[in-house]
Amino acid sequence: MTLFKMRVSRTQWAVGHGFFHSGTITAEGKPVTYVYDCGATTKNQRNLKREIDEFVSRLYVGPKYQRYLYSRSRNVDIMYISHFDYDHISGIPYLAKQTSVSRFVIPMTPVSSRIFCLAGSLFPSVYYSSSNNSSTYDANVGDFDEWYWDFIANPVTALREITGPDVEIQQMTPLDEEEIRVDETVSEDYILTNSEIRNSAIRSYSDLNISQPQNRLNLWNITNLSGAPVWEFKTHVLWDAQNQAAVFVQKLKQLALINDEKDLEDVNIVRNLVLNHTSDLKKAFKDAVAMIGSSFTLNITSLMLYSGTVLGQKLRTFRSKAAFYDRPEIGAWPTVPGWIGYGDASLGAKKRLHEAIDAFAEYRSRTYVIAPPHHGSPREWGSELLEGYGLHGNDAPTCVFGADGSYGHPAQRVLLDVNASGGTAIVVTSDCRSRWTDSLTVYVDA
């Protein structure tokens, strides 16, 4: 047996209430670096820039440290954007100035849904109306940079403005289950034994590249020099993303703020709405939320992401020392390396919760870290998300939250569920000492 050896290092960055996750996979040659969201609330923008600067410094270092950092250029090979809330995308322009981003994967949503996210970023008091002093959650319109309005109106154009006309942008729609279903029976002997590792030939040097399998729009693979896939990224967007904000458009029309949904694709109209009709925009949002209901109010369009080993391959994972020591390693020693991020997906309804679980059913046994939905909000939470991990589906995951207590996130009920399951909860705040880097050595039979 010939095994392929990789090193994986991923970090949850300390941006406070927001989300910025990155990872680098390497086999000592050219690495692949990915990012999942890069943003924070308006009050945390200074912390966000600090974390982006630290991220970039780790991508570009002197030769002395190359063998530890496994990275040789300021390049992000692929960036995933889960949804259009300000606290998940506000750092992208600054990140794009500091690095070269080769491709983006974003959810394809109607402009009405993007404007709905914008209103949610401006007026969170509508959603958290039951909280004390909820009006203090509302953002100051002047604190939002103009690029955000451009991005909401036309995300493809806005991304190309800050990266260049040749950047690759893939927009993901909900896929038919027949298209994304993997025909595979999960084997119970997919974990490599110590004996198999000792008695196998080990390939530990290779440049890594990223490519997309034919007819698999929701997958990207990392391949070695021989072309064998050794790591994969899988996305899923909930079916309820379709027409989620139609009610909101109707409210905007009733208030004579727009004549047609296509008006919202004009960035000048979007700016006019936000800057000169703020109270009417809030009223339309509030009325829409009241009609849609709490389980449908936020971010059904979130793109969820699996990052881990390829289905069908045997594997074994060992924890390794992080090149940059952020905080003590947390959780049990993993045998699998996978990570699943749920963005701000609204999983409070059983139908959507089970769809998310089913979408990653085969991958959960290869996963030991998850980023629960919406910073640990109880409205988007289901304790069933904690089930099905590890070799026999009995392991509890390590749960990472990007939150600083705003809006009560992560909620006490969510933290209690994680601990009751035997899992570990890691809350990464705006304090750089809470930043968490997870470093692993991974063997696969590729």
Image (cartoon, rainbow, N blue to C red):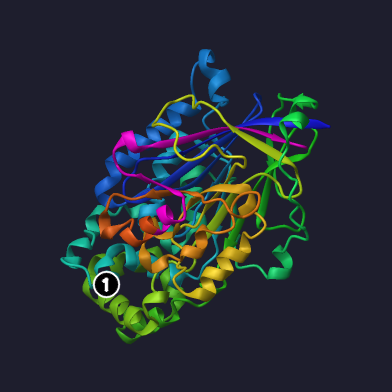
Residue 281 falls left or right of residue 420:
left
Where is the N terminus found, in terms of image quarters? top right
Q: Residue at the location (65% across, 49% down)? A: 391
Above or below, 142 relative to 336: below
- In the rendered structure, which amino acid carries the disc numbered 1? Val
Q: Residue at the location (75% across, 46% down)? A: 189
User: 206 or 287, which is in the foreground?
Assistant: 206
Above or below, 380 relative to 332: below
Q: Position of residue 252 (x, y in %)?
A: 34, 80
Q: Quadrant of residue 284?
A: bottom left
Where is the C terminus found, in terms of image quarters? top right
Read off the magenta span.
417-446
Give the residue at the far right of this rendering: 1
Residue 265 falls left or right of residue 284:
right
Which residue, given by chain and number where applicable, does mark 1 sit on? Answer: 126
Q: Position of residue 27 (x, y in %)?
A: 66, 28
Whether residue 7 is in magenta: the answer is no
Q: Secondary structure at mark 1?
A: helix
Q: Position of residue 307 (x, y in %)?
A: 59, 47
Residue 238 falls left or right of residue 361:
left
Residue 168 in sight from this viewpoint: no
Whether residue 430 is in magenta: the answer is yes
